[in-house]
Image (cartoon, coloured by chain):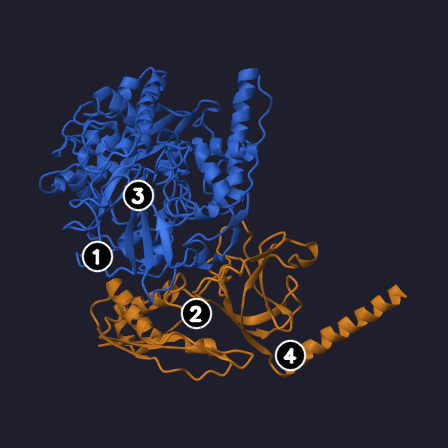
Chain colours: A blue, B orange
Amino acid sequence: MKHQNKRSPLAAGILIACCAAATAASSDYSDSSQRWWAPGQGTPLPAYATYDDDSGAVGVLNLAGEIATRGHPFFEPIGANGRACVTCHQPADGMGLSVRSIRERWQASGGKDPLFAPVDGMNCPNLPPEDPRSHSLLLERGLFRIALPWPPKRPDGTPIDPEFTIEVVRDPTGCNTDPQYGLNSPHPTISVYRRPRPVANTKYTTHQNFGVGPFIGKNGMPTATDPATGKPTSMNLMADARFPTLAVQAEDAAEKHLQIAGKLSPAQLAAITDFEKQVYVAQVTSASAGSLVEPGGPPALGPRNLAAGEAGVLGNNTTRYVFPLGEQWKHLPRGADDAENARNAARESIARGHDVFMFRTFWIKDSMHLNTVGLGNPAKRTCATCHGMHMTGMDTANGWMDIGTTNLPWAKEVPLNPWNEERPELPLFRITCKPGVKPHPFLGRVIYTQDPGRALISGQCNDVGTIVIQQFRGLAARAPYFSNGSAATLRELVDYYDRRYNIGYSEQEKQDLVNFLGAL
Amino acid sequence: MMRQRSSSHAVLLVLAGLVAPLAAHAAEERKSFVSCPIVRDTATVPCWLAEYEGKTYFLTIQSDVSAPVTPPWLGHRVLVEGTVANEPNICGGIVLKPVHLSVLPELDPSCNTILPAEDRYNLTFEPPRPPGPSKGRLAFSYAPPPPPPPPAAATTKEFTVPYDFDGMVGFSHPRYLTPVLSYAKAIDAQEIEIVGYRGGARLSDGRTLLEDAGIGRRRAEQIAMLLKGAQLDGPTYKVSWHDEPPHVTGKDDYLTRRVVITVRPR
């Protein structure tokens, strides 16, 4: 199938207007022009810096002190396309990348910034460059193309015999049916579209503590090991757990995203991973609740507390807590004036949101690798059940699950009808579990998905649509959310859970949760 | 009149309550059946029940991953193999203890009953794990892997890996496989023999359920793959299986569903 730009002129107009609106909104930030960190710009990265974000400011702490970025491989354009690691891991975006920044770069560069490199910054590399329609997934949802071989391969390069067949049902980007880039190309490839994850707080994302052993706690399969040490890893670094360590991820990113000639040198690799191991990110200011890092304040908040925290331990308990906030914001006294009262009300809302996260039970149903790991289906539990790692809200064990963000019937889909000109943006795949293989416990033998997630790596039916839980820190700096950017705001994220699990949150509970998440 | 009848009923119930446990004690009453699981909410954690021949049986409660018996799944039928216990009903169900539960693989959307909480069915004990955060520990503990013995003590050692009906390796199996791995590495094992078995279950109604043909082979080969994948690639592997129908009696049939791993030293 030859790719066609299927977006209507109206939709394209909306896209351009959307970009323009984002730029107009960004003018509220006095330092907007300073937010973007260009590859090779050479300015030092301070030991501690704050950047305005959607609900206040995010803090970036470098434990190693000020970083000289001149010549540093994380900050220099070491590849052929002009990108650096920092292109997609921006300090102002909590070492991730917000769609706000993406749109600002589009406006500022006319689509010429290396960020929009065809290899993965375009819906498919064969589309017309510098046309917003060719980059719509990046501009609208912050999604990069991830091209994965099919069938999957083991780390040693040998092919895996997958438990299922995969067909392309819908291909709005044209890439999965393209004769050069698609499933039937000489190098069969599946393109999925995902958000970049923040490169910060990595002692948590790469811990080797509770839940990490020779076999995966979710399914008993062998755990991926660190090729340098042979030790099992937490497999919590990537959305599909395909790379076990920072070093392996950096090598692949240099090749695939930066298009480096050859390989990173040992010195470059060490410089990149050393930097990634010492940078901490968390929200430090709330526009409504004020400073989140006052002396004696909540012990979970801010990057300094995060840097001091214990990695890879369970927090889903009343002895340690996932995000320990203490009691000080629960019942604040009446303030001296309206401003202080408003600030105190916002702090109390954050504290209530924490309690909703920690203690509000609901029925968690039909979620692969949660309901199947000993809790039963359904399980009456709380947010902290899955988001249980102390200080980050990740899973301490190897943490991929299917909560429905990419699998039908729960994934966000465009309503198709004669009155709606909007058309689906993401591909849709049909997965059929082979005869002799057990059906997926909750989705059966035939599964429709926008992104098979971990299954593209493991080849297992039970992994279809499973995505590794990611950390909750610096969220306000890097919208949109979920691996496919399907929640534009924290409120949309909360609304998704409310619908998915029929929770029945009150309006107050939703707002409190949003305020709590925005303070992390 | 009404009061008298109620009193008579109460006496009968008490008597029945006394007689039934005595009878159960005299001849251990085993139940083996396939049914839809039922969830009953309570003021704390949910209870899991199942109905068979007009009676409601209590299977387990929700706790956490460490529990020796974990709840089944709505959307699937469950094979229940248990012994009627001499205990008061829980959540309105006759207690089966010990009980073995196997979630059957095929989907059954008719298994979808969630009963609301009722005061009369609230638990009379504190569950080992509340529905929300724990108190800082797992609900249950199981024996940690044995420490590696000194080389001089290296002996042939046998490990048994249990399975649910028609089940392959799942979330609970690291607790069985990790000790094998640790021991084999500690003694620098020369050979690992793996024998997979196909099991079955004799139901209370006289029928026999057999696991999938070929599952003994698949289990044995999967265990070999997992141990090699966990970097235990020094020993030689001897893999075999028994896929003939097992002899099942209705008593401890869950033991037929297994893999036996023998680790031999040099």
Q: Report x, y in % for residue A228.
A: 19, 52
Query: Same chain for marks 1 and 2?
Result: no
Q: Secondary structure at mark 1?
A: loop
- Which comes sooner in the sequence, label 1 or label 3? 1
Query: Same chain for marks 2 and 4?
Result: yes
What label does residue A427 carry, if any? Answer: 3
Q: Amino acid at mark 4?
A: Ala
Q: Report x, y in % for residue B130.
A: 56, 52
Label 1 and label 2: CA atoms lie apart by: 29 Å
What label does residue B24 carry, if any? Answer: 4
Q: Amino acid at mark 3?
A: Pro
Q: Is residue B108 above or below residue B135?
A: below
For mark 2, does the 10 Å Cα neighbourhood hold few (<14), some (14 to 19), or many (20 or more) residues? many
Output the chain of dot 2.
Answer: B
Q: Secondary structure at mark 2?
A: loop
Label 3 and label 2: CA atoms lie apart by: 37 Å
Mark 1 or mark 4: which is in front?
1
Q: Are marks 1 and 2 in contact (CB under 8 Å)?
A: no
Q: Secondary structure at mark 3?
A: loop
Label 1 and label 4: CA atoms lie apart by: 54 Å
Output the chain of dot 1.
Answer: A
Residue furthest out toward the front: A418
Q: Amino acid at mark 1?
A: Arg
The image quadrant of residue A344 is: top right
Mark 3 or mark 2: which is in front?
3
Output the chain of dot 3.
Answer: A
Residue B166 in sight in this render? yes
Quadrant location of the C terminus of chain A in the rendered image: top left
Which residue is disc 2 drawn over? B164
Residue A452 in sight in this render? no
Which residue is disc 1 drawn over? A154
Output the chain of dot 4.
Answer: B
